[in-house]
Image (spheres, rainbow, N blue to C red):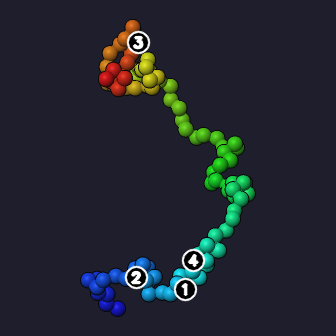
C-alpha cells in the first residue's frame, strides 16, 4: 500500500473538533476510570530486582600484588605504572592526575 507522505496528517486534536460535547465527556470519563489505585508498599514488596541476593556468591577476580614497576599515589591511593609518576611531595609519590 502506497503512503502519501506529503499529505497533511490528522492528529487527535483534529478529530476532537468534530466530536460532540457528550462524546468528549464520555471519553474523558473512560480515561479517568481506567486508572488503578496501587498501594506503593505492596508494589515495593512484590518487586524483586534481578541479582539482588548476592550473599552466597564469591568473586572470581584474581588480585595481583603491586609490581616492581608500580607505585601507589599518596593522594588518590591508586596503583599506577611508573610512567604515570609526576613528582614526589614530602617523599611520597604523586600521579600525573593528582599533580595537575
Quadrant of the snapshot with the C terminus: top left
The residue at the point 65 percent across, 74 percent down is: 33
- Badge 3, how many Cα within 10 Å: few under 14, some, many 20+? few
Crowding near pointer 2: few (<14 within 10 Å), some, many (20+)? few
- Depicted 20 relative to depicted 40: above or below: below
Q: Secondary structure at mark 3?
A: strand
Pointer 3 with pointer 2, Cβ within 8 A? no
Name the residue nearer the viewer: 17 or 8. Answer: 17
Q: CA distance from mark 1 to mark 2?
A: 15 Å
Real-space Cα separation, disc 3 to disc 4, in angstroms: 71 Å
Q: Which numbered disc, 1 or 4, marks the residue that appears first in the sequence? A: 1
Residue farthest to the top, as pictured: 90
Residue at the image point whose x is 43% and y is 83% from the top: 17
Residue 78 at least partly seen: yes
Q: Are marks 1 and 4 in contact (CB under 8 Å)?
A: no
Residue nearest the viewer, comparing 23 with 11: 23
**Which disc number belongs to residue 67?**
none
- The residue lying at 71 percent from left, 59 percent from top is 39
Q: Which residue in the protein does label 2 denote?
A: 14
Q: Nearer the viewer, residue 19 or 48?
A: 19
Judge depth for marks 3 and 1 and give the one in front.
1
Which residue is label 3 attached to?
Answer: 92
Residue 25 x %, y %:
57, 80
Residue bearing mark 1: 23
Residues at circles 1 and 2 in contact by the CB criterion of under 8 Å:
no
The disc, 3 or 2, on the residue closer to the chain's N-terminal end is: 2
Question: Mark 3 or mark 2, which is nearer to you?
Answer: 2
Res. 1 image quadrant: bottom left
The Cα–Cα distance between marks 3 and 1, rounded to whole angstroms, is 79 Å
Read off the residue under disc 4: 28
Q: Position of residue 7 (x, y in %)?
A: 28, 85
Amino acid at each position: 500500500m502506497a503512503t502519501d507522505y506529503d499529505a497533511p496528517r490528522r492528529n487527535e486534536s483534529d478529530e476532537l473538533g468534530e466530536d460532540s460535547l457528550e462524546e468528549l465527556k464520555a471519553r474523558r470519563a473512560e480515561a479517568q476510570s481506567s486508572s488503578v489505585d496501587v498501594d506503593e508498599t505492596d508494589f515495593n514488596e512484590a518487586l524483586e530486582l534481578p541479582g539482588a541476593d548476592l550473599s552466597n556468591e564469591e568473586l572470581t577476580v584474581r588480585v595481583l600484588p603491586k609490581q616492581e614497576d608500580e607505585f601507589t599515589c599518596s593522594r588518590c591511593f591508586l596503583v599506577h605504572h611508573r610512567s604515570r609518576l609526576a613528582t614526589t611531595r614530602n617523599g611520597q609519590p604523586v600521579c600525573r592526575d593528582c599533580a595537575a
